Amino acid sequence: MLAVCTALCTGLVLSACSTQETPGGSAEPLRTAGAPEGALHLLTLPGYAEEGFEDRGVDWVAPFEERSGCQVTVRTAATAKEIHDRMSGGFYDGALVPSEAFGRLVDGGRLAPVNTRLLDSYKSLDARLRDLVERGDQTYGVPAAWGADLLLFETGKAQPASWGAVFDPRESKPHHKRIVWRDSPHTIASAALYLKHRKRSLKIRDPYELTVEQLEAVAELLREQRPNVLRVTEDATQAVEAFSVGDAVVGMGGAYELDVLARGGRPIAVAAPKEGVTGWYTAWTVASRARNPNCMYQWLNWVGTPEVQKQIAEWRGVAPADSRACGLLRAGFCTAHHVGDRAYIDRLVFARTPDAGCEKDPECAGWSDWTEAWSSLG
């Protein structure tokens, strides 16, 4: 423990270090801000820590380095699984964590609680998003962006109002081989919302808390529908491509895909399924083994400013966690993404790790069950 404390305290005031651990196994939050250590190692999904490599005008890392004195090393991961795996074994100061990996990293002791009193803009972030990163009386992340999983369709060829348009072989028959899914086990949750209303005998209450029997029923529906699906997309650009060339007619999508396709002149729209809408969020987190926690807190403050929130929202095509960014974004952006729409946000069923609540219930389907069910679809 002394060795751990010595490593954490390099460049810090001694009062910021603690040998105590939270129930999740991660270190205590930083108590006071100290001098920056001069380096920062980040793990992130693409587009959240841009250094101007793809577009010289898109760079909020270099200004941070100049302002903070922290030299940033950015490593990117393509998926939530990769974020989880690399945070479980690597030495990063912090990471941009998707909602589906957040709970597993907290429970695994990979994330340190965040002292939100050291963050200038934390209280300006959306209250619902702040609730999602809390565990008991601790906060484990700083929301960065969010979005909803909607029905994307070509007007004139489809007018879907139900998840059945993409998941039910019978309801989707007019569009077989022209359907797009997202390549994620969390697609199961959207299908579970559909079965919650379509097959009430299953007694599904929460799409992220399924029993083994309920999960198998959802998986069976998806297995039956899989041959009718044109493409299972790994990212939004693949969905955009399928719709832009007219191969896809209906599928899973969101505001980003709609914006890109509409700008390209494609007759595309989105709809909120009548069964309900799942959502997602990303959050910046502090690693429990962070070697440069002061630089990490400076980064948390930096990416929480409206100016950087605006840049991330534009570059990634996502809803910013801080509605103050809307004053800097182009007209209509925040309306399209429902930023500040309290009723809309409160209706979303945000993604989370399905393991929650399974510890004492052998009938509960955990994350490993979800990933196995998804991989079985081929």
Image (cartoon, rainbow, N blue to C red):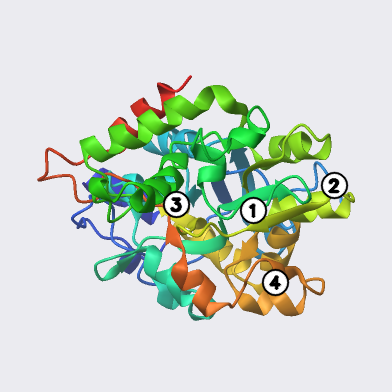
Whole-percent x and y of residue 7? 36, 47
CB of mark 3 within 8 Å of CB of mark 2? no
Whole-percent x and y of residue 216? 29, 32
Q: Secondary structure at mark 3?
A: helix
- The residue indicated by pointer 4 is 334
- The residue indicated by pointer 2 is 55
Q: Is residue 317 visible?
A: no
Amino acid type shown at disc 1 = Gly
Marks 3 and 2, the one that precedes in the sequence = 2
Amino acid type shown at disc 3 = Ser
Q: Nearer the viewer, mark 1 or mark 4?
A: 1
Amino acid type shown at disc 4 = Cys
Marks 1 and 3, the one that precedes in the sequence = 3
- 89 and 279: which one is in front? 279
- The residue indicated by pointer 3 is 99
Q: Is residue 47 above or below residue 66?
A: above
**How far apart, in angstroms, are the residues tagged by discs 2 and 4?**
23 Å
Q: Residue at x 53, y 57 (%)?
A: 273
Marks 2 and 4, the one that precedes in the sequence = 2
Q: Secondary structure at mark 2?
A: loop
Q: Residues within 10 Å of mark 2 (few under 14, many from 20)?
A: few
Q: Nearer the viewer, mark 2 or mark 1?
A: 1
Marks 2 and 1, the one that precedes in the sequence = 2
Amino acid type shown at disc 2 = Asp
Q: Secondary structure at mark 1?
A: loop
- The residue indicated by pointer 1 is 254
